[in-house]
Amino acid sequence: MSSMDCKILELRPDRKLLKSNFDGYKLSLEPVAIIKEALQMMPDRVHPSEAQYSFLHAQLFSLQNHLIHDPWTNDTCYYIDTNWTVKRIQYNLQEGRFKPIASVFHVKRTSERLPGHFNLTMVFISEKFAAIADGTAWIEIVDTGDRTKGQEWKQVLQMRVLPDEKSGFVLKDARLEIQQESRYIHCLLMRVEQAEGAFESVLEWIAIDLTGKAVKLRREMRSKSSISYSAFTSNSSGVIVAAGKTVKFTYDSENPIIKEDNQENGQKTDYTWKQTEEDVVITFHEREGAEKANFHVKCTAQNICVKYKDEILIDGDIFGRIDVDLTTWNLQNRTFQVTLVKAVEGEKWLHLIPEGPLEDFLGKMDEMVEDSAGNQTGISSLDTQMEDCDRGDEDAEYFVAKFDGGSHKVTHKANLGNCSPLFDVTLRPGHPAALALRQDVDCCLWLPCQMPSEWLLRHEGTLDAFAYVLASKQQRKYVSCSPDMAYAVICEPERHVFIYKSKYETAAGLRKRSGGPQVTLGQQKVVSLEDAGGQVIGMNVLNEVTLLLTEKFILCLQINTEQ
């Protein structure tokens, strides 16, 4: 894929959504009211088999949220019990208590659960449709009707979507698409497979024709790393993926996969590159009888083009900006070199051009580099660098990319360095989930948006200093924030729940010292989980309350966001 096909997104936070005077969180000892309701039957859970021992399997099983939120209703969520019955949980805000837990649907068992299968998963497609995967090779489309009325659901169809009954998957996303008089349900399935001695993350994109009750489209994507985020674009024409290593299409039932002539397919590039704090040096392979006049170099602040006679050696948008006036090139001992001087000294380049070769000294790529933009928050207690526990895999270069389903190419890409996404959260029903990304000590929420003329990641809000907070929470299991972004929650498997609110009205007007600048404080609360009935296996963070699911209870933490 040439660099012209892919637009590199520069994630620049909206300064209006950042607080330069935020000074951390103040611990509040005020208790959080907890309401506990006993479950009639335990939630259904599958534990990994002996063959599912990889880190990728551990993520799919241990981090699965068994409490499914309905984004189209503010106060309703669901879980599936051991009888495979979908249970509705509603919290009455006016009365401050749970409504009776009700059964709304029974998932039909079509095959025996075998080692290697996964948990049941459910995704709400629209106000009236949902998709349920049973963890084996089957999927069920359900007509829920008007879910605000609490009526029972009806099955639309149930079909096997994988040829092998021993295979299984979890359902990551689903969307309804209407073409002329036909309705299609696009489903994004994830599983882990062992290939050539290594485990891979596999994304399966299928389109189910509701009229013909058949799978009309099947696409497959694979990666050697964990895929931390995956979702359809708003119009179901592409997939948004966040990962730490290359993700690529490997199968398409409609359009054959075209292998590109690049480094990954065995062809070597014509150059290598390395960098220092000040510059980037590109070294081209030797050419017999070459003269300096045979090489043509053209540079702009963010683009480079080098030709040898009529042959293009490199052409594309570079990672960072350069000082064009200081660009030099030289031919010595049949080796041609171009030296680019960085406009921002000390900036770490993660690549030279998109899809180009890695830097020569890859072993040093895991070194942390301070934020060269100099965007200091002025937080006295948070002005140190992130702890090591906040770093990702040493050999990973995390990114968020939009893949086009028809061409199989990356059309938009944002590079995240060695910091993986912190979490994702649904802010608006019908839209892809927003990504929570680290920006210095803050946590910025980016919403994938399809505009009339472009696709982008839009900065929707900021959780002040929350990235710094997360770095110290090694026992965290679930992390999320309310849809209005008023507060965030970190939940441990058993012991504690941490609540962080950026606004703390009682601290208004606080100053660091006499005559010093005014600062803003947030509020932290700690909830101890006593007699919770086992581990927390699900969490939903709503605007007014946070719901937790354990093996025996559903718990409601009443959050006063206006305090």
Image (tube, rainbow, N blue to C red):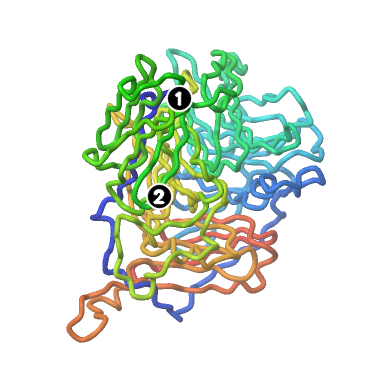
Q: Residue at x 41, y 36 (%)?
A: 282
Q: Residue at x 49, y 50 (%)?
A: 418
| Mark 1 crowd level (few <14, some 14–19, many ≥20, 10 Å Cα) | some
Name the element at disc 1: strand
Q: CA distance from mark 1 to mark 2?
A: 35 Å
Q: Quadrant of the C terminus?
A: bottom left
| Circle 1: residue type | Asp
Q: Position of residue 491 (x, y in %)?
A: 56, 63
In this view, the residue in front, 80 or 478, is 478
Q: Position of residue 421 (x, y in %)?
A: 48, 49
| Circle 2: residue type | Thr
- Above or below: residue 163 compared with residue 391: above
Is residue 472 toward the left or the right of residue 509 in the image?
A: right
Q: Which residue lies most toward the left here?
A: 515
Residue labelled with disc 1? 404
Q: Quadrant of the N terminus?
A: top left
Q: Position of residue 150 (x, y in %)?
A: 53, 44
Q: Residue at x 57, y 41 (%)?
A: 227
Instruction: Please tell me in which quadrant of the rendered image residue 135 appears.
Output: top right
In this view, the residue in front, 20 or 111, is 20
Is residue 472 toward the left or the right of residue 452 in the image?
A: right
Q: Which residue lies most toward the bottom here?
A: 514
The tag earlier along the polypeptide, 1 or 2, is 2
- Above or below: residue 46 compared with residue 195: below
Mark 1 touches mark 2? (CB < 8 Å): no
In this view, the residue in front, 179 or 9, is 9
| Mark 2 crowd level (few <14, some 14–19, many ≥20, 10 Å Cα) | some
- Above or below: residue 537 compared with residue 337: below
Q: Position of residue 371 (x, y in %)?
A: 36, 57
In this view, the residue in front, 63 or 290, is 290
Residue labelled with disc 2? 276
Q: Which numbered tag is attached to residue 24?
A: none
